[in-house]
Image: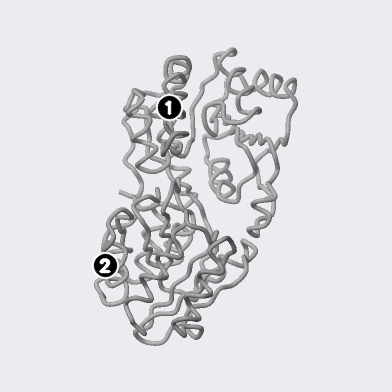
Amino acid sequence: MTFVFWQGIMSIHQKTFLEAVAAQAAVAKVLLVVEHDITDYRKNMGWDAPVFTNVEVVTGPSKQQIKDIVHANKEAVHIMGGIRVGSMLAVAFDRCVKESCKLGIMTEPYNDAGYKGRLRKLKYRYYKMRYFKHVQFVLAIGRQGVKQYAGLGFDTRRIFPWAYFITVPVSERTNGVNGIKRIIYAGRLEAAKGILRFTEELVKTGSVKYTLDIYGAGADEENLKQLISANKLQDRIHIHPFLKYDELVKEYRKYDWVVLPSAAKDGWGVIVSEGLLNGLKGICSNICGVSWVIKDRVNGVVFDWWKEESCGNAINSMLNEDTFADAGTISQWAQKSISAEAGAAYFMQVMDCVYEDKKKPAIPWE
């Protein structure tokens, strides 16, 4: 089989999954077509454009090139990173429809909050009427993605819960001080990510059982620095600049917990997956798609962002409970459940379900 993935940019978070799909015995070719190689926004976060192995890449194709790619791969399965999201994907989607290609969607949930969210709901209802009949499957990222497409009336037998399936280097862990929870956060320092609120709740505990390293930059950086200074916690809470991605993943071996306390739409939250693969436990809000893979008091804790006391309760569980699985168990589970190899195997089962009428596959992390 040949697969053509149409996406906005080259993503570090898709690289190992696409390579794992290309390594499957039944796969003849994987082609990735992107509108841009990488955005300045991602460069500022320490990303470099990834170099793919055994995956053909086309960047910034013209309309004629898009037409030629679709026609040359008419028998392939085309997977779009959303329905007509951006100019290139709109042209590619329409061309695949015209050529009657096998067509699927891989998508995060759209932001349905506020006035703009209501407008997006109207847009997707229009998409339902005009385009759903041309789409054979949806790889819906996170519970919210599944809920949205089911709510729009897409055939639930063809909605498959999805994740960012990744593989990262797993380093030998370093030993910490007994009883001290070593916590890492990496990402933007802004209200939508919730890291200021999380840190405020952590400080409120008065505990001495933790260290917190924050890697990132953003509007909340100064507020975080003031909070740290006011509570004289410079020895336990540290703010660092963004690290290059390859450098960041090597840091996980130094930590016990990874945190993602998002306050607004977070389709998945790959930092938690990276941590789990390295044996860390995760603490995240229920807004994050990755919360789906957290088994409470086993490989982490999920808190309800909308309940004021929930974040503090989760932090207390992190600091004071010892019922969680050990690092080796968590890492082994993650390799079988959310790694790129697990995702590629699941993807092929999805293809068999959709195009060979086989049984709908089980969700890997469940």
What residue appears at the point 70 percent right and 39 percent down from the top-left corner? 36
Task: Please state the horizontal and vertical placement of residue 27, each as a whole percent of the image.
Answer: 55, 35
What separation in Å lies between label 2 and label 1 (alpha carbons)?
39 Å
129 or 349, nearer to the observer: 129
Q: Earlier in the sequence, mark 2 or mark 1?
A: 1
Q: What secondary structure is found at the residue carrying circle 1?
A: strand
Which residue, given by chain and number where applicable, does mark 2 sit on? 313
How crowded pointer 1 is (Cα within 10 Å; few <14, some 14-19, many 20+) is rated as many
The numbered disc on residue 247 is none
* Residue 309 in picture, x, y percent from top left: 26, 63
Q: Is residue 106 above or below residue 17?
A: above
Q: Amino acid at mark 1?
A: Phe
Instruction: Estimate how packed mark 2 is, as few (under 14), some (14 to 19) or many (20 or more) residues with alpha carbons within 10 Å.
Output: some
Rendered image quadrant of residue 80: top right
**Which image quarter: residue 363?**
top left
106 in relation to 14, above or below? above
Q: Is residue 42 above or below residue 196?
A: above
Q: Amino acid at mark 2?
A: Asn
Query: The N terminus lies in which quarter of the figure?
Result: top right
Q: Is residue 219 left or right of residue 150?
A: right
Q: Position of residue 29 (x, y in %)?
A: 62, 34
Q: On the image, numbered disc 1 is attached to which residue?
A: 137
Apparent side of residue 268 relative to residue 238 in the rendered image (left or right): left
Marks 2 and 1: CB-CB under 8 Å? no
Q: Position of residue 269 (x, y in %)?
A: 46, 53
Q: Nearer the viewer, residue 55 or 94?
A: 94
